[in-house]
Amino acid sequence: MQNAINRRLFLQLAGAGGVVWVTGCASTPGNTASADFYFVQLSDTHWGFKGAAINPDSAGTFPKTIAAVNALNPPPDFVVFTGDLTHISDDPAERRQRLKQFKAMAATLTVPVVHYMPGEHDASLDNGAAYQEFFGATHYSFDHKGVHFIALDNVSDPHASIGAAQLQWLQADLATQAKDARIIVFTHRPLFDLYPSWDWATADGAQALALLEPYSDVTVFYGHIHQEHHQMTGHIAHHAAHGLMFALPAPGSQPKRTPIAWDATAPYKGLGYRRVAEAKGSAATLTELPLQGA
Amino acid sequence: MLTRRQLLTRAAGLVLIGYGFNGAWAETPAPKVYRIAARRFTYTPETLEIAANQPAIIELTVTDVLMGFALPSLHLRTDIIPGQIARLKLPALPAGEVPFLCDVFCGSGHEQMGGSLHVV
């Protein structure tokens, strides 16, 4: 099978990459539709960010990431960006300029399929209008080799809500799936209350989780918090990804959620991306790859 | 000499003081009113001292764009809409610090926009 990952090879790659973490989202018995493949999650590239004390290579970090992903062999089946493609600008023209530049750079990814999602920096000031001009719909679903993927937008509403209309769409989308279907959800913000005092939550995330709860094999991948984080809500696993511009402190570890300063002795520390391997009949395998050395 | 308006205000205050939820005469003080003004990307004041063990009302205004005012530890929040006064009722609180933040994404300084209630 083209692009199929030899499981032994993948584990070797995972070991070389650093942290290896195996999710608790084991396939349910009889769920054998999945085929072997892997995808890459990139998050929080914040194109347009400037701050030498935080990232003196702000213009070079995204190209470096693209080069690292293009060097993956075998290549992933697809790449997904889980939001905050660009850093916020209060100027609508500058916002569009950053989105345009990001899109042009992302086009140099040699992976043939790339899925995009907005973060609040891309979409919250204009309800996603500029984002949609460049990348289209902010929520959607698709199927790939036996896995049902759902991208949820919890950022276009500046109140950090999914909203009644999208929840209704989610309910209808899930109704097409068997209760033991393998379902992967992409969001920008966490769907659960990770740390509301830092705005690390989704106002109506509990309603989305209630809709997902009847499905036995659900995993959520998200961004927003610029660090690896894993949590279960019931049987649903949630995995936050590293950011690709600056790292943020652990939830509640300090009074303010200010970015972590650049460490000249360990450039790109705290930045990275994730590979997710899907194999029929077994749990997904997550590999966290630091950007340093890429 | 009290004006008619002052008399009405004081009378209303006595009613609030005098009656609890069950309508019985009680020594419940009227909520004290505090004010916070918001603009991108600050609250003034950022630290608001309020009295402990006494209900309060915070009146919030904003001069530029839609914002939020959230007290996550109390599960309370309100929108602040330009040109309007938002009123958030607080229960009697024990002494301590209660952080607040803007929970409506309002721009480039949104993530630094917050403060705390200093309850004494």
Image (cartoon, rainbow, N blue to C red):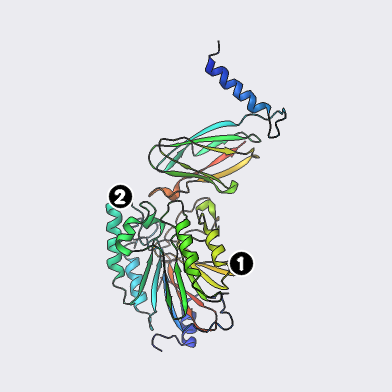
Tag 2 residue: A91
- In this rendering, the answer to whether A168 lies above or below A291 is above
Horizontal and vertical percent for residue A236? 57, 69
Horizontal and vertical percent for residue A80? 40, 70
Q: What kind of element bears circle 2? A: loop
For the N terminus of chain A, give its image quadrant.
bottom left
- Which of these two is toward me, A11 or B87? B87
> Based on the displayed image, in which of its 4 quarters is residue A151 positioned?
bottom left
Of the numbered discs 1 and 2, the one sitting upstream in the chain is: 2
Q: What kind of element bears circle 1? A: loop
> Based on the displayed image, in which of its 4 quarters is residue A85 positioned?
bottom left
- State how far apart marks 1 and 2 are (Cα): 42 Å
Crowding at label 2, few (<14), some or many (≥20) Cα neighbours within 10 Å?
few
The total number of labels drawn is 2
Crowding at label 1, few (<14), some or many (≥20) Cα neighbours within 10 Å?
few
Q: Residue at x 51, y 54 (%)?
A: A203
Q: Residue at x 33, y 56 (%)?
A: A129
The kind of residue on which mark 2 rests is: Asp
Q: Residue at x 44, y 56 (%)?
A: A259
Horizontal and vertical percent for residue B117? 56, 40
For the C terminus of chain A, give its image quadrant.
bottom left
The subunit letter for the residue under badge 2 reads: A
Q: Residue furthest top?
A: B1
